[in-house]
Amino acid sequence: MLPMLLVLFFILYFLMIRPQHKRQKQWQSMMAAIKAGDRVTTAGGIRGTILSIKDEAVIIRVAPDNLKLEIAKNAIASVTTQESSSGS
């Protein structure tokens, strides 16, 4: 019975826990590298360009009316740097 539990634990670790840790590390490195001028997409689907970065918040400019929004850093789902977006 004990070997079966150990096998089950290792299966759960490699299928669920380990991939979640990898995603969390990727997100943390992405957050550490954000800077003004990067294009971001929030978890709610709002796309904009970073104007300034505060401690726990980011101010973004949203097209077409150039609205400025202050969002929490945790709400950022993805980042596209200015260099990679200007090449397309």
Image (tube, rainbow, N blue to C red):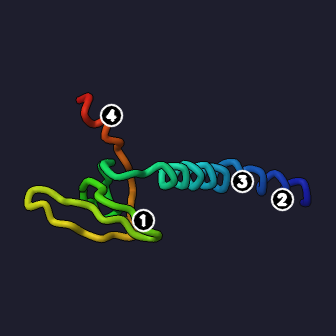
Comes first in the chain, label 4 or label 2 = 2
Closer to us: 36 or 28: 36
Comes first in the chain, label 1 or label 3 = 3
Relative side of 21 to 9, left or right? left
How far separated are the C-alphas under marks 4 and 1? 21 Å
Q: Residue furthest left?
A: 65
Residue 85 falls in image quadrant = top left
Which amino acid lies under the numbered mark 3 shown in the image of this protein? Tyr
How far separated are the C-alphas under marks 2 and 3? 12 Å
The mark lying in front, picked from 4 and 2, is 4
Q: Which residue is mark 4?
A: 84
Q: Which residue is mark 3?
A: 13
Q: Looking at the picture, does residue 39 appear above or below residue 83?
A: below
User: How far across and how far down the image is residue 22, in percent?
Assistant: 61, 49
Q: Secondary structure at mark 2?
A: helix
The mark lying in front, picked from 1 and 3, is 1
Q: Residues within 10 Å of mark 1 (few under 14, many from 20)?
A: some
Q: Secondary structure at mark 3?
A: helix
Q: Secondary structure at mark 1?
A: helix
Q: At 30% across and 71% down in the image, what residue appears?
A: 70
Comes first in the chain, label 4 or label 3 = 3
Number of marks in picture:
4
Q: Looking at the picture, does residue 58 appear above or below residue 81?
A: below
Q: Which residue is mark 1?
A: 73
Which amino acid lies under the numbered mark 4 shown in the image of this protein? Ser
Q: Looking at the picture, does residue 59 appear above or below residue 64?
A: below
User: How far across and how far down the image is residue 55, in percent?
Assistant: 47, 69
Q: Which residue is mark 2?
A: 5
